[in-house]
Amino acid sequence: MTLNRLISRRQVLRTGAAFTAMSALSPARVAMAGPTEDPFVLRAAAGQAALRPAPYGPTNVWGYNGSVPGPEIRVRQGDRIRVLARNGLDEGTTVHWHGIRTPNAMDGVPFLTQDPIPVGGDLLYEFDAPDAGTFWYHPHQRSSEQVGRGLYGPLIVEEANPIRVDRDLTWMLDDWRMTGDGQIATDFGSRHDAAHGGRIGNSVTINGQIPERIAVRSGERIRLRLVNAANARIFGLDFGGLAPVVVALDGQPVAPHAPDGDVVLVGPAMRVDLVIDMTGKPGESVTVTDVFYRDLEYRLVDLAYEPDRLRDAVPDWSMALPPNPLAEPDMQAAKRHRIVFNGGMMGQMMMGGGMGSMLEQMREGNMWFINGEAATGHMMDPLLVLPQGTSHVLEMDNRTAWHHPMHLHGHSFRVIARNGQPTRHREWQDTVLMAPEERVEIAFVADNPGDWMFHCHILEHQAAGMMGVIRVDSGTTKT
């Protein structure tokens, strides 16, 4: 996958010059209450956050429990998650548990799995955590603005026997389109953003801050959980002289391996778990650089070695994570479905008889299409109806000039081929990044009944039509 998507030079990042205290920058962690205790309360409301370092003032945001990101919810695999979502906004909202294989009623999609939580209202989300891994939560109601203003947080499901590391850190990566006075630009819903690469910001944060340095120790082994919470920005992180090892993608274990080209690629909504050994000497530093957008590379943060060593040599500990209980697709019996993505600026139009329909939909304001149809309104006919327990392959063809991180709710899938070539790791994911003009095949078992969203997680693309519904029919699913 080439790193060649250009953005305007006016969008070059302003990283700030002030020094942030050397810390792990981890969000506040919350342990889940027991099944007989009160649920954890998660309140969405307007507030302020110090997105920019001193001496700059606070930025008006929307956040959970008064912070951006919201609290890091940590549970053990198999635990019951009970969260009471309260709406302190001036509009309806929901909470979607991205990557968690919840029951359909807990998926947080307005007008599909639930009504929006009304102003001043609340809703109890309750489900088990079947898979260990790195997940996150965010609204699915007007998500391009609600997420874009800061409503998101990490959800970490710990393994019963996690791999051994010295520190387990979470970095929620985000970018913000800031005005000259340090506030969030209000041009949400821009047609230009929707027809191009989405809402790209001009300031990048790690866990809601613009850090100068983060402290590490020589000989330390870190598990770094990367979560891309940005509306549209794709991150391509170069860790300098370090050698990160990928151990999980979208929460699902993968055979430990070096990232392609030594660049850790994280598309919107995707997660990558890394194991990194800090091999530098005390007093040194290494720069983490985002190199995804050509000619617009920038320094994300420096990792600064403290004066004392933790140990003299790299520890000899296993990096292999235990597998999650995912149903393996039956490739011999799998039914194949062709999915074609069209639309946007500079993209190909739909082949066959769908041209007239697409032009009519474009006149209605839609810009992106799945098999010639754009999502409109709150109710949609299913793109596919799949019998529960059956195996399927989606042959996805990106006929556009833009990247698309395609996310399937309620399921994880194996990425089995790119441009006709088998993938090396057949990785499990729930969000797969497709490059312009790329063909990707994914395989999964339709084992979670209900109507599930399938959409581009560049949130402006989703809002402009690039989403559909895949129905998993148990035989009792309402039609």
Image (cartoon, rainbow, N blue to C red):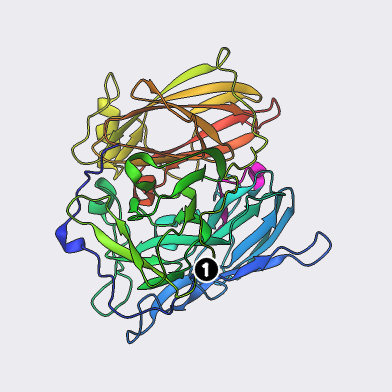
Reply yes or no: does residue 95 show up in magenta.
Answer: yes
Q: Which residue occupies 53% across, 62% down? A: 169
Q: Which residue occupies 48% across, 64% down? A: 151
For label 1, the residue is: 26
Which part of the image, by quadrant, shows the N terminus? Answer: top left
Question: In the visual, does 446 lie left or right of 207?
Answer: right
Q: Is residue 445 above or below residue 256?
A: above
- Indicate the position of residue 113 as horizontal and vertical percent values: 60, 46
Residue type (three-letter) at the residue carrying disc 1: Ser
Question: In the visual, does 467 lie left or right of 341?
Answer: right
Specify start and end residues of the magenta stretch as a single range.
Answer: 93-105
Question: In the visual, does 341 lie left or right of 101?
Answer: left
Relative depth, front residue between 240 and 353: 240
Q: Which residue occupies 69% across, 57% down? A: 75
Which part of the image, by quadrant, shows the C terminus? Answer: top right
- Indicate the position of residue 386 as horizontal and vertical percent values: 58, 24
